[in-house]
Amino acid sequence: MSSGQMRDAIADFLEGGGWGSRLLQQAAARRAGLFHAIDFGVVAGGTTDCTSAIQAALDATAAAGGGVVLLPPGTLKTTAPLIVPTLVQLAGAGTKATKIAFAPASALFAVQLGVAAGDDRWQGFRDCWLTCASPAAGAFDIRDTARFGVFERLLIEGFSAASGIGVKLSGQSSCNCFHRFVQCQIKTFLAGAVLSGNANANTLQDCHFSVCGTGLDFTATGTDTHGGADNFVQRCEIDGSTALALALGSGANRNIFSQLQCDGATASVTHHASAQDNAFLHCHLSPAPDANTLALGTFLQTSFGESDETNKTRLRELSLTEVASTPPDPSASDVARLYVKGNTLIIQFNDAGTVRYKSLDLTGTGVTWVHATSAP
């Protein structure tokens, strides 16, 4: 074979779709900072433990100087925490495509940041559905050395409104700060998000907390002695809380809540006497905070209790995520909830103490609403 024929044969092999072509694709992707988790042994399907394979992809990306680990569509089972290194992002194919099913044998968190010695910076996690099975401690454990994390378009789901933490931002030794959570849905935890200790200067934007014991908890947890400070919460919604929507504990100072919608079973907001300079701008809080809370915080253009004609929110589009269980009964008379469960659109209404349900089957062609006093 001549040198020209040898060259042509090698080119055909590399470009013909075989493993040679795959090697070229891998090399090009890695030069661009992209690492495919399937190249490290990740297998979708929900039965193979993918923890070690995903961690190997994360570590290889960090060793290369940083980049993005791309997760394939499908269900990826994990059984131990994924530790996201500095300068590494983990990206799925979308909340309806990539699901990480965390099934630990003990009370662990699914994802950890700030584990390495020294500063951990610029991590990210996006476009995934993350579920936590019992006895998980929660979804995200973001420790005090972590900085500048970005978390976008995540569906984070626990197993009980009486157990676990969706997002835990805490720390004593240094500031756990400048993280951004954007367009995340966090549901079915004892606490949707906890910001305590030196969890400062973080942003939660366009997030939805539902069916949690407490939606947002700015109180001391673990070894922390005070709540988080100087955080910004914008256009977030907290509903279906079995206890309260927002808790501001001792030391939770100078937090700003803008366009926050709160619906708590027992209270919308509780405010510790030593929590100072927290501000609520253009918010709606139901039930109305007590007199002590109102005296301690700053409330500007904020409505309380049932909305009237002057503070109704007008929506161009309403997106509903299907719920697995019926939300708690509306706590006040003449209050309604709208939700989707089992391909059925349901209106839940407190009619002077009697909870009524109007339901519509979305899979059929009919338009007949069914009335009941028990949940469909």
Image (cartoon, rainbow, N blue to C red):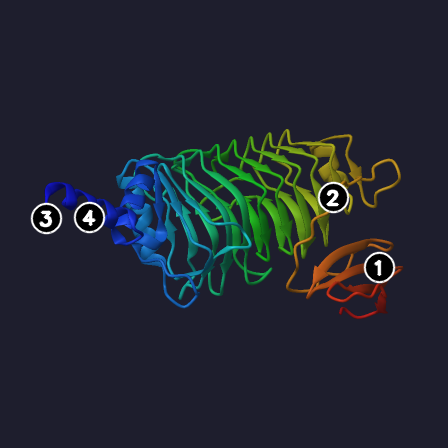
First reached walking from the N terminus: tag 1 or tag 4: 4
Disc number lying in front (4 or 3): 3
* Kind of residue at badge 2: Glu
* Dots 3, 1 in contact, CB < 8 A: no
Q: Disc 2 versus disc 1: distance between alpha carbons? A: 25 Å
Q: Is residue 46 left or right of residue 117?
A: right
Q: Disc 3 versus disc 1: distance between alpha carbons? A: 85 Å
Does residue 230 show up? yes
Name the element at disc 3.
loop
* Kind of residue at badge 4: Ala
Name the element at disc 4.
helix
First reached walking from the N terminus: tag 2 or tag 1: 2
Q: Residues within 10 Å of mark 3 (few under 14, many from 20)?
A: few
First reached walking from the N terminus: tag 4 or tag 3: 3
Q: x, y (%) of residue 349?
A: 83, 59
Q: Nearer the viewer, residue 308 or 296?
A: 308
* Dots 4, 3 in contact, CB < 8 A: yes
Q: Disc 4 versus disc 3: distance between alpha carbons? A: 10 Å
- Label disc, if present, on residue 350 of the rendered structure: 1
Disc number lying in front (2 or 1): 2
Disc number lying in front (3 or 2): 3
First reached walking from the N terminus: tag 4 or tag 2: 4
Q: Residues within 10 Å of mark 1 (few under 14, many from 20)?
A: some
Q: x, y (%) of residue 79?
A: 39, 62
Q: x, y (%) of residue 23?
A: 26, 47
- Label disc, if present, on residue 105 of the rendered structure: none
